[in-house]
Amino acid sequence: SSVDPTLRTGYHFRPPRNWINDPNGPLYYKDFYHLFYQYNPYGSVWGNIVWGHSISTDLINWKALTPAIYPSKPFDIFGCWSGSATILPGDKPAILYTGIDTQKRQVQNIAFPANLSDPYLREWVKPDYNPVMPPETGLNSSSFRDPTTAWYNPNGHWTLIIGNKRDADNRGMALLYRSKDFVKWVRAKHPLHSAKNSGMWECPDFYPVALRGKLGLDTSVIGAGVKHVLKMSLDLTRYDYYTLGKYDDNLDKYVPQNTSLDNHSGLRYDYGNFYASKTFYDPVKLRRILWGWANESDTPKVDSDKGWAGIQLIPRTIWLHRNGRQLLQWPIEEFDTLRHKHVSVANKLAPAGGLFEVKDIQSNQADVEITFDIPNLDKAEDFDRSYIGNAQAFCGKNTAETKGGVGPFGLYVLASSDLEERTAVFFKIFKNGNKHVVLMCNDPTRSTKREDIYKPTFAGFVDVDLSKAKRISLRTLIDNSVVESFGARGKTCITSRVYPAVAIGKDAHLFVFNNGAEDVKVSELNAWEIRKPEMNQEIIY
Ligand code: DQQ
């Protein structure tokens, strides 16, 4: 059976039709935000890749332009793959991207706006001296792609990294390149960073974050008062990982601190359906913004029948937690302008084994913020060290309906009135000596009555200290077939794609549930219907 066309997202970024994947080259220029993205103009499965292009003044309402970069030269004739933008002095954007050349090699190319007085940056020129970074001897030309935004090293060089894998030992790497003029690039002898057995690093990203506060930093900021973030998308696991660490601009080396990539154990932006992400610095609101791609969970056959596949998630402001241990993420504030009809609940008990419905809004496209107070932690089950690194496996076995001690409690979203369909987003709290461990799960095992749908359970731990306040918050954005959740004000995020058969449109319901043995209290719940923004309706030529 095929997907109901009304399950297409309304407020998540998408083109009018067809396949999309990675966000590319996000930038701000002359009053407009630009987003480029991997796009198949001819179909709804991956292929024929060009850079789709849209503009916005608020990152929420989008106008579609014609593709900005598309195969036209020997150095990109078989595809224009992912890359990034750098704003050069004098407010001059430049794009570096991976081209697939006549020999099917991955090469790095440069493109400049044809006309800097066009704020839409509609036309891009690819000089004939491309590629600017060909795969040199010894490099695997099929694992050499996705250049980052460049940063300016005080030693006088523009510097960037490119994703790579060394075949001999499957070592994933961030190759380092330097340039004085942005045109002639030379590879450094050593990579910025690498990790054994991690396989191909796709779409690396490297940027500074301030030690204190929410303000973002321009990509070239270096020195005391900042940490650096290195993120890569691991082709092996299809998840994005990051580490926090120190960038030594003299040696051009990055050293992770208290985080490592060994055994794919880095921190995660999102524990769900989230890949090939990229950040950019927004000079208007002085913040760093994260874009991430979510693919469909349905089959390519269904994608090709329905004519669309893939979205970008709501852009997230990203900053360092003051404990220095992790990043925090939150939907950009502009998103709140889409909030419409509102309901609220205060001081309502979610009794052990009970549930209640949140009524009076249509919740298939909604924004829900909830705070749970947990009066008593005595019944928390013991934490087993074997759960570390295995959150997803634990939640796969222990679903939202598995009775527990403290929790599972949380939301049933996109639920049918009889609860035969529901996607559960919930917390479960364990006892670990005299401390507590919080686990967050997204359980879509009952998200649809349709068969043959890929319904992976996702989960991550939440680094909160319940000894200060026995309380935890959750925000969930619901958009027909997307459930995008932020636990503990952006500490742990989980995105999931689901395709209900019944819980569609007006038939989608929202519940608060508690399948633990201990009562919890909803101290506050606010839920809003979400209006539809302008979403790439017609192409501007
Ligand atoms: N997608 C692009 C590549 C990148 C991959 C091709 C990640 O450049 O490595 O569409 O999803």
Image (tube, rainbow, N blue to C red):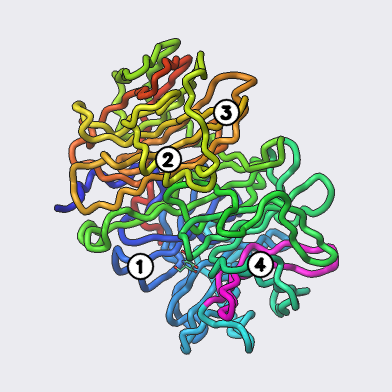
Q: Residue at x 40, y 24 (%)?
A: 527
Residue 351 is situated, as x and y percent measured from the top left of the image, at 37, 14
The mark lying in front, picked from 4 and 3, is: 3
Residue beneath disc 3:
436
Q: Secondary structure at mark 2?
A: strand
Residue 119 is situated, as x and y percent measured from the top left of the image, at 56, 56
Q: How far separated are the C-alphas under marks 3 and 1?
A: 44 Å
Q: How far separated are the C-alphas under marks 3 and 2?
A: 25 Å
Task: Answer above or below: position of 471 versus 227.
Answer: above
Q: Which amino acid, by three-letter code, is at mark 1?
A: Trp
In the image, farthest residue toward the top: 347
Q: Residue at x 59, y 55 (%)?
A: 27
Range of magenta residues = 143-171
Residue 53 is situated, as x and y percent measured from the top left of the image, at 46, 60
- Name the N-terminal-most of marks 4 and 1: 1
Q: State yes or no: Cβ of the residue under disc 1 lies below 8 Å from any atom of ligand 1.
A: yes
Q: Secondary structure at mark 4?
A: strand
Residue beneath disc 4:
194
Q: How far separated are the C-alphas under marks 4 and 1?
A: 29 Å
Q: Secondary structure at mark 3?
A: strand
Magenta span includes 415: no
Q: How far separated are the C-alphas under marks 2 and 1?
A: 24 Å
Contact between marks 3 and 1 (CB within 8 A): the answer is no
Q: How many marks?
A: 4
- Name the N-terminal-most of marks 3 and 2: 3
Q: Which amino acid, by three-letter code, is at mark 3?
A: His
